[in-house]
Amino acid sequence: MFTNTVTALSTMKKWIDEATLAQLEGESARDISKALMLLVIKRHPWRCVFGFGVPTAVAWALFGLGGFPVPLFMLSVGYFYFWSLGTQVFMERYAQRIGFVLDHTTHDPEAETGIVFHRGHTKNIAYRMVGTIASFRSALYVYGYTVGSGKHAKRYLTTVIDVQLPYALPRIYLDAQKDASIRAVLGSPHIEQLTLESNEFHRLFDLYVEDGAQVEALQVFTPDFMATLMDQEQHVDIEIAHGQMYLYQNASLTTSHLDMLISRATMVVGALSRTLSSLDRHRRALTR
């Protein structure tokens, strides 16, 4: 019964050539996935009926209503397949659009220095693409992890931009989303909240730093840098962790969302690089 379904899914990719994929249009991964599914059903209706309809009919004939989970399972598998392939196509197109390259190698979230990667279990990095932002090596990807277990489990998906900085700095976390779940991690004994002079800034953001790093944080978060951050219409979480800078936002695989993140990263890297260059010159002057 399941053989026909598995066979149909394994051969679907053969039905979808590059010319077909090139016809798909959409501004989100969901648009591409939906268009792909409708196109396959339109071009190969009898194969779809045979692959999914026949097993369903057999299950209902043998088990009656007891066979109801069978079509649900097959529809779920089919939907997941179209979603995965459609998302892959969307991310490949987006990478080409911004001059990035999709990285198909496996990356371990545990190897990342960002504090968000220390949370939960069942972690994975997907759809990772690499390139440069303001001349700095960068990556964009979706990070997923699970908190809790059983019926209390909750899956989190976060769009991440990871930028390699030329200078090492202590951990600084700018919390724009004011997410209670991330505050649980930030509330560790080695992280403390730093209060700056701007009340408007604190209305929008909470700033956390490592113990003993208050001076460096104040040197980074200058009035000009804070003004640049406050001027943005949409705010994202920013973390500086040694030689890395991360931008975090709840995952939404749409062109507008990814464009916004790239724009924020370009703005932040540009403003931060000027601050870090000034800080580096100051450090060198002190060591002479």
Image (cartoon, rainbow, N blue to C red):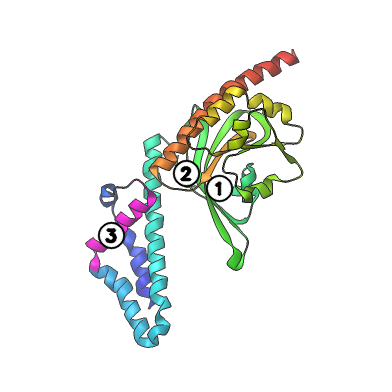
- 7 in relation to 110, above or below: below
Q: Which percent across, then down, holds residue 25?
A: 29, 47
- 152 in relation to 206, above or below: below
Q: Which percent across, then down, holds residue 254?
A: 40, 45
In the drawing, does residue 231 fall left or right of residue 167?
left
Q: Quadrant of residue 68?
A: bottom left
Residue under label 2: 103
The Cα atoms of the two marked residues, 1 and 3, are separated by: 33 Å
Q: Regarding mark 2 in the picture, which secondary structure is present there? A: loop
Determine contact: label 2, label 1, CB under 8 Å.
yes
Q: Regarding mark 3 in the picture, which secondary structure is present there? A: helix
Q: Residues within 10 Å of mark 1 (few under 14, many from 20)?
A: few
- 56 in relation to 127, above or below: below
Magenta extent: 27-45
Q: Which percent across, then down, holds residue 214?
A: 73, 30
The Cα atoms of the two marked residues, 3 and 2, are separated by: 28 Å
Residue 38's label in the rendered image is: 3
The residue closer to the viewer here, 55 or 75, is: 75
The residue closer to the viewer here, 79 or 259, is: 259
Mark closer to the chain start, 1 or 3? 3
The Cα atoms of the two marked residues, 2 and 1, are separated by: 10 Å
Residue under label 1: 107
| Residue 284 visible in the current orientation | yes
- 66 in relation to 98, above or below: below
Q: Quadrant of the N terminus?
A: bottom left
Residue drawn at (31%, 71%), measured in percent from left and top?
Answer: 51
Residue drawn at (32%, 62%), measured in percent from left and top?
Answer: 12
Q: Which percent across, then down, holds residue 78?
A: 37, 65
